[in-house]
Image: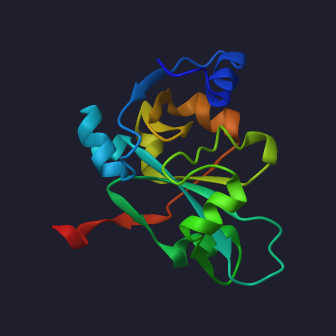
Amino acid sequence: MADKLNSMRILEQHKIPYEVLTYPDTVHDAQEVAEILGVPYFTVYKTLVVQSENPPQPKPFLVMIASDHRLDLKKMATIAGVKKVKMATHKDAEALTGLKVGGISALALMQKGWQVYLDQPASQLQHIVISAGQRGTQLRVPVVPLVNLLRVRIAEVSSPNDDDL
């Protein structure tokens, strides 16, 4: 078992149960993570760093979407109330969050006050699997307490990854 991470401490402080799931930290792809952990793709949520293309945007925001979906930039811009958004590059995402890609976690960034969006399909699930803030460690958490804790905005911001079918 890995050392206790801040994300785990936060969940414990708020009395939210969680399950720690670990995998090799060389795996960065959320769908691969789902396979290794033996959980359905649609329950593993990746956290994306999204930036407005029209300054002044005070801060990028975090968007959590299922591993079998891709971010719809048009929908995201509309929901965020900006003209256009773009995905942060891996380098920018790591610089902005202080976390490695594959380990970016809304829980680990709570104290930074970022706006967090959760893709609408999560609201149909009891639990989702999210990053604990470190590559190789995921947390299975109940959706409703997580939404309340992170004050996420639930919105439809993705489309299925059907290009690989």
Residue at horizontal 47%, vertical 33%? 137
Choose between 135 and 69: the one closer to the eye.
135
Residue at horizontal 24%, vertical 41%? 35
Left or right: residue 119 compared with residue 113: left
Choose between 77 and 123: the one closer to the eye.
77
Q: Position of residue 141 (x, y in %)?
A: 50, 28
Choose between 95 and 113: the one closer to the eye.
95
State whether residue 146 is above or below residue 31.
above
State whether residue 129 is above or below residue 153.
above
Which quadrant of the structure image shows residue 124? top left
Q: Position of residue 165 (x, y in %)?
A: 15, 67
Which quadrant of the structure image shows residue 140? top left
Q: Position of residue 149 (x, y in %)?
A: 69, 33
Residue at horizontal 30%, vertical 50%? 31
Left or right: residue 152 compared with residue 162: right
Residue at horizontal 36%, vertical 53%? 29
Scheme by which the image is coloured: rainbow
Q: Position of residue 108 (x, y in %)?
A: 67, 39
Left or right: residue 85 compared with residue 39: right
State whether residue 61 is above or below residue 104.
below
Q: Farthest residue toward the left?
A: 165
The image shows a total of numbered marks equal to 0
